[in-house]
Image (cartoon, rainbow, N blue to C red):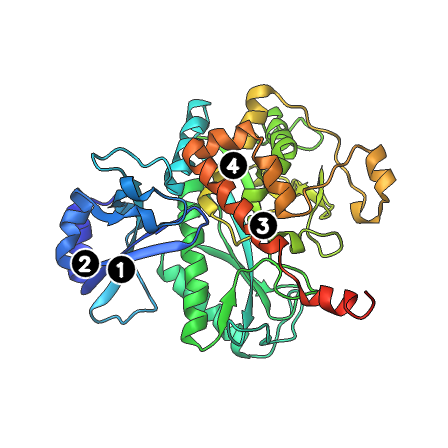
């Protein structure tokens, strides 16, 4: 971790005038306030006070004083701002007056889950998320920029240039990019970051989302991580590749096993399968998320695992000789609209619960689950994820695991917010209803 003196030197050497302090609310929406370079030394030593009562999911007004404590590891200069009198950012931990971590801080919730992992003897929780998103002409509608499909090499239009500029900006922010390509739907794109430790990756995800949006805005268009913006087209997911390591050894690999999976990996996968319905309201947290989670659009709704089959909830990529380090599982139901700190915390905790309790993994389902009838799925014991936010939040509300991970404070606020959102949606009269029922009823 850089020292205070090293950060102050970076500020001076790079002509940094302002530092933006970032953190997220419970929904994962990025919050920020700016300080001048002269305030930075105090911010690194004592933190900066702010009113937490106006932040969604944070404190009530009578106990609203909060402190944003900048994490020196997250210092980066923002590439889309002017390079003279430049602007840097630091991601913050939220503290209570007196310096105790604030239990409602999503970053702290993930740190708690990682601490538990370390107590269980693991050193690293590696995550490699694949975030999909759309480019539209503006935020008022869904007018697309291109008609490309999966891996299409579209002509050098705006979307190709946007992706290129975004990748370069991410690299300037210290984020390693593995792939970038056109996705299945028109105007849908994906930039994949190289896997990293859970906390670093959650920080990278919030940075990635803002970077995609900033570069789009700079070029006069709009980027969105809304899970299902276009009816009849694939939605945007965030497939999450995950593994646990002890030192440099992949705890998921076992060369003697027919699937090359250790008992640790199998119990981890079993934990995620068992607890998926309880945590889906965090992995897919909005009313719109469940418009994506329907059969037929490559979104997994069936609770099963497989090695080749992308219709299953979890895929274990086939082992390649000499690539023990790459042994991992991929959870395919999360979407990129959520709070990555909470998403990673619940996934990790469900997997650790499976390891702790010695959960047994079922046999893999290698056939296309979309092609089975409801009765055939029932015969094989394959259950489905909840079909709506209302159904999902009712299951989460009874979950001891999610309550433990989030802590009572954030758990209660999350349930309350999501119930309110579901009620607001439930009472709407949609265009579909007017078109379908008004002429016949």
Cα–Cα gap, marks 4 and 2 = 36 Å
Q: Quadrant of residue 301?
A: top right
Residue found at x 69% / y 33%: 259
Assign a secondary structure to mark 3: helix
Residue found at x 62% / y 63%: 183
The residue tagged 4 is 346
**366 or 386: nearer the eye?**
386
Residue found at x 53% / y 48%: 420
Q: Which of marks 3 and 1 is in front?
A: 3
Residue 286 shows in this picture: no
x then y, percent, for residue 111: 39, 35
Cα–Cα gap, marks 3 and 1 = 40 Å
Pointers 1 and 2 in contact (CB under 8 A)?
A: yes
On-image quarter of the N terminus: top left
Cα–Cα gap, marks 1 and 4 = 31 Å
Outermost residue toward the left in this view? 38
């Amino acid at each position: 971790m850089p020292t205070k003196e090293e950060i102050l030197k970076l500020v001076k050497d790079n002509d940094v005038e302002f530092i933006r302090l970032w953190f997220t609310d419970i929904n994962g929406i990025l919050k920020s306030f700016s300080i001048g370079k002269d305030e930075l030394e105090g911010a690194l030593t004592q933190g900066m006070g702010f009113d937490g009562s106006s932040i969604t999911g944070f404190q009530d007004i009578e106990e609203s004083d909060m402190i944003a404590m900048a994490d020196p590891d997250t210092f980066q200069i923002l590439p889309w701002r002017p390079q003279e009198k430049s602007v840097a950012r630091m991601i913050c931990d939220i503290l209570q007056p007196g310096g105790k971590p604030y239990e409602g801080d999503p970053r702290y919730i993930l740190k708690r889950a990682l601490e538990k992992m370390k107590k269980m003897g693991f050193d690293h929780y590696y995550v490699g998320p694949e975030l999909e998103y759309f480019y539209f002409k503006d935020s008022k509608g869904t007018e697309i920029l291109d008609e490309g499909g999966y891996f299409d090499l579209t002509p050098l239009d705006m979307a190709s240039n946007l992706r290129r500029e975004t990748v370069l900006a991410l690299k300037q922010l210290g984020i390693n990019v593995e792939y970038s390509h056109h996705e299945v739907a028109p105007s849908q794109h994906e930039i994949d970051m190289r896997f990293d430790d859970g906390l670093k990756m959650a920080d990278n995800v919030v940075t990635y989302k803002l970077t995609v949006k900033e570069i789009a805005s700079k070029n006069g268009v709009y980027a969105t991580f809304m899970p299902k913006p276009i009816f009849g087209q694939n939605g945007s997911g965030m497939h999450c590749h995950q593994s646990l390591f002890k030192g440099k050894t992949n705890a998921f690999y076992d060369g003697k096993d027919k699937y090359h999976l250790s008992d640790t990996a199998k119990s981890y996968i079993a934990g995620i399968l068992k607890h998926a319905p309880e945590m889906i309201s965090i992995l897919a947290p909005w009313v719109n998320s469940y418009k994506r989670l329907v059969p037929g659009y490559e979104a997994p709704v069936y609770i099963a695992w497989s090695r080749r089959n992308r219709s299953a909830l979890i895929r274990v990529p086939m082992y390649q000789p000499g690539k023990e380090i790459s042994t991992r599982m991929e959870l395919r139901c999360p979407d990129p609209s959520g709070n990555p700190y909470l998403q990673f915390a619940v996934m990790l905790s469900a997997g650790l619960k499976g390891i702790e309790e010695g959960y047994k993994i079922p046999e893999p389902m290698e056939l296309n689950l979309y092609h089975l009838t409801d009765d055939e799925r029932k015969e094989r014991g394959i259950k489905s994820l909840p079909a709506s936010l209302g159904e999902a939040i009712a299951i989460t509300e009874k979950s001891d695991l999610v309550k433990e991970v989030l802590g009572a404070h954030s758990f209660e606020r999350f349930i309350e917010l999501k119930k309110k959102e579901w009620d607001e949606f439930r009472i709407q009269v949609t265009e579909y209803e007017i078109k379908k029922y008004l002429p016949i009823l």
